[in-house]
Amino acid sequence: MNPSIDLEAAKAAFLASGGSIIVLDGFQYVPHRPHRDIEQVRAVQPKPISQKAQKRQEQLAELRKLAKTMTYAEAMEHTGLAQTTLYRAAMEGCFCFRPDPKRGRGEKNRAYADPEADKALAAKITQLRDAGLNRHEAKTKLGISDRKFCRVIHLFGVDYPKVEGKRCDGPV
């Protein structure tokens, strides 16, 4: 039937049996607690540096001075520390040692070969080919690598036959 009529009838029966109606409070808004970063933060007293950390800082300062004038090898000889220790110290202290002048600078400045020596080598390779040696025997007799052998024969246009069944001519 009608829900409001049913509700009124249920309410009247409840009150007639001795019950009482209590009105409860509804929802009330409670603001969130303020964030910690909004609250005023007190300055924290810095902890004193431990003796071990102080020694490490002194060692880094000493190595930083050495790095301005020395390479890793010279610093290893001077301090007696291993290269990995010096490298870790350089990474931690944000400094670097001088580069070793004896060490190569990569592909840019490398002189691969002497042209006169290569010309003489090409002549020797031609003689060995005419003598009937295969590529492997020629490389072994001359004491050169496969890469150098292939580079020279390509550079000077030496026609050196390959063994049957080989897929490529090797690196150049």
Image: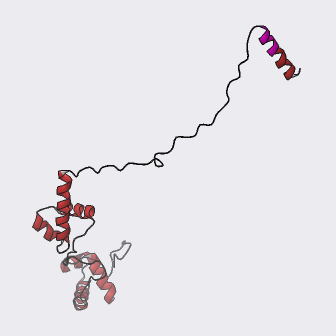
Residue 23 found in image quarter: top right
In the image, 138 versus 79, the foreground residue is: 79
Q: Which residues are magenta?
A: 11-31
Q: Is residue 155 left or right of residue 11?
A: left
In the image as oriented, which residue stretches furthest toward the right?
A: 1
Magenta span contains residue 6: no
**Residue 38 visible in the snapshot:** yes
**Residue 159 visible in the snapshot:** no
In the image, 77 versus 151, the foreground residue is: 77
Name which residue lies at 51% across and 44% down: 34
Magenta span contains residue 21: yes
Residue 131, position as x, y percentages in the image: 22, 84
In the image, 14 versus 166, the foreground residue is: 14
Residue 9, position as x, y percentages in the image: 84, 15
Name which residue lies at 31% across and 85% down: 153
Quarter of the image containing the C terminus? bottom left
Q: Main secondary structure of the magenta part?
A: loop
In the image as oriented, which residue stretches furthest toward the top?
A: 17
Residue 111, position as x, y percentages in the image: 26, 84
Q: Is residue 93 left or right of residue 33?
A: left
Quarter of the image containing the N terminus? top right
Picture layout, residue 55 above or below residue 124: above
Picture layout, residue 21 above or below residue 66: above
Residue 133, position as x, y percentages in the image: 24, 80
